[in-house]
Image (cartoon, helix red, strand yellow):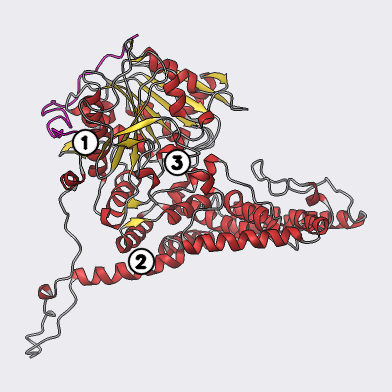
Amino acid sequence: MKSTAQPRPSRRNRSGPAIGHSSAPENPIPTSAQHDSDVPAPRPQIGVSIEAATLAPGAERAGCLSPPPQPDAGLAELIDRAAHAMQARRTLGLSPASMGLAAADWWTHVAASPGKRLALAGNAFRDAAIYAEYCARAMAHRPGMRDTANCIAATPNDRRFADPGWQRYPFNLLQQAFLLQEDWWRNATSGVRGVSRHHEQVVAFAARQWLDMLAPTNSPLTNPEVIDATLRTGGMNLVEGTKAWMDDLQRVMTGQPRAGAENFVPGKQVALTPGKVVFRNRLIELIQYSPTTAQVWAEPLLVVPAWIMKYYILDLSPQNSMVKYLVDQGHTVFMISWKNPGPEDRELGMDDYLALGPLAALDAVGRIQPSRKVHAIGYCLGGTLLSIAAAALAAKDDERLATVTLLASQIDFTEPGELSLFIDESEVSFLEDMMWAQGYLDTTQMAGAFEMLRSYDLIWSRITRDYLMGQRRPPNDLMAWNADATRMPARMHSEYLRSLYLNNDLAEGRWKVDGQTVTVEDVPLPWFVVGTEADHVAPWRSVYKIHLLDHSEVTFVLTSGGHNAGIVSEPGHPRRHYHWALHKHGSAFQAPEQWLEQATPEDGSWWPRWSAWLGAHSSQMTAPPRMGFAGAKPLMDAPGSYVLQR
């Protein structure tokens, strides 16, 4: 059936043509000669003007006939940026100033808080007494006997000490000493009056990184699992681990992907859903997938993935491909495949990503299926960009969209989760200087930040397993995709961090498109929004804020899993569940915790509910549309060429 959502009158006067229509090219398939037309006008570059150098104040009064020229602001900035870029290579992109400010804020307030220091000293003495008693009891037992009366337990998500060997003497002493120390630092870095919330989180993060590095699990001399494996295999685990380390080192030095990733090449082992590239510009390729049903829903789907990742997260292996699932349900699917930008793309900004991305793709879909509204779907950063596009279209009374689906996407960035650790004025400026030198944010720099957020899961446990246990685990399709990241242009990433993370311009009504302020409040469409329970990139409570920003019909789903695994949650996947509820137009707002108490729980994948929702907001079933533009051949087979760029 058709959507019953009623459009609301806008708070602004609508004017101007529909976005994208007036600039649609007559020839919808750009050739190499036409690519220049897609290049945005050059923006001013930072430069040095020797002629602009001014004389020192008072030089003539001092009798200097030819006073030495002073460096102008451009030269000073040039020197500073070059110095910061060199420093960033040594710090993996982390700003020493940001870390120093956080440490100074914490230490100054601790030093000025005798009560907090007294409480921490009391905790230390208490822990020492408990640990001394524990050691006495442990040593009274015969070596090897388990002592289950631990003085402290690991957190539920900490699986480092799950092996029974950690309950044997003397390894139980090492385990308990580490956990007590971890608990003391957790108390020391939290609850200090006067410390800003951001600085508190940064200090706690830094303390956790050091502790994770010093954990007894990381040494072959203090890890009982490694010792048992060494005795059992005659040291072959260390031999195999050394081979794995040397292989990884060679791959890092030569820029090759992680071991095993070569077994998951797009178009060969992953991204196998048949389709054609029907449109290309300097930033995207648009893929149209071949139908598998005799009849399809009249309204097509346009998917906008994040440009920080390759699109095939949604088209992995056939058994867990979201694209294949949607096509098999009778949906016509169009997918944006982003280019992997290089230094020549350093001046591409958010406006370019909007115009050359979802708006250009929407124009192309409209040329293939005229007079059909489109179900728009955005994942992660792609969902944020899609929200901007939907708001821009609404501001022009452009009614080409039928619905909007956001998958783990934020619009309000006041609570962005653990990524906020890397985002303040000092850190963003440092990143800008690093990107200024190379033109983009490198994939290794982004991956390092994500890995540090879960260092004992993604770094140290892998080092222990691969290099000490000699048990290299072959990657699956999701792991191989995760290693196939993309770069981000300097200007775009700077604008994204400043406008969204630092200033929250979209949620607070300051985002402009073509000079006009746009807001998602003006989007009179049904929304289907998905958050994931264990998301450290887009926390579900942050995603849930769509209820505060848009007053249309919102179907919100909270699914098990993390930022990626929660979205790639195909039917039949074991141990999956979700909650869902419909927020009707005009209904009162519910806090996230209240919503969770009242939402309907379901077992299994949320995909079937979403597919049914798309069908309910579609008009009818029809014959499949043509592949590509009338009178023109598709450019090439899916997955295209942009997805293969490294």
Q: Is residue 75 above or below residue 574?
A: below
Estimate the x, y position of residue 422 in percent, counting from the top left. Answer: 43, 53
Helix, strand or loop at mark 2: helix
Q: Is residue 81 left or right of residue 442?
A: left
Mark 3 / mark 2, whichever is N-terminal: 2
Instruction: Tell me the CA gap for discs 1 and 2.
Output: 40 Å
Mark 3 / mark 1, whichever is N-terminal: 1
Q: Is residue 489 above or below residue 621?
A: below
For the residue carrying disc 1, how many other residues have a C-alpha within 10 Å: few (<14), some (14-19), or many (20+)?
some
> What's the amino acid at mark 1?
Ile
Q: Which dot, 1 or 2, sits closer to the camera?
A: 1
Estimate the x, y position of residue 434 in percent, counting from the top left. Answer: 35, 62
Q: Any magenta on residue 119?
A: no
Instruction: Tell me the CA gap for discs 3 and 2.
Output: 34 Å
> What's the amino acid at mark 3?
Pro
Q: Residue at x 46, y 37 (%)?
A: 313
Estimate the x, y position of residue 249 in percent, counting from the top left. Answer: 55, 63
Report the front residue among 132 and 291.
291
Q: Is residue 248 above or below residue 321?
A: below
Residue for badge 1 = 29
Main secondary structure found in the magenta portion? loop
Q: Residue at x 32, y 55 (%)?
A: 342
Residue for badge 2 = 85
Query: Magenta span covers which residues?
Result: 1-28
* Res 415 → quadrant: top left
Q: Tell me the tag on residue 266.
A: 3
* Res 517 → quadrant: top left
Q: Is residue 588 left or right of residue 595?
A: left
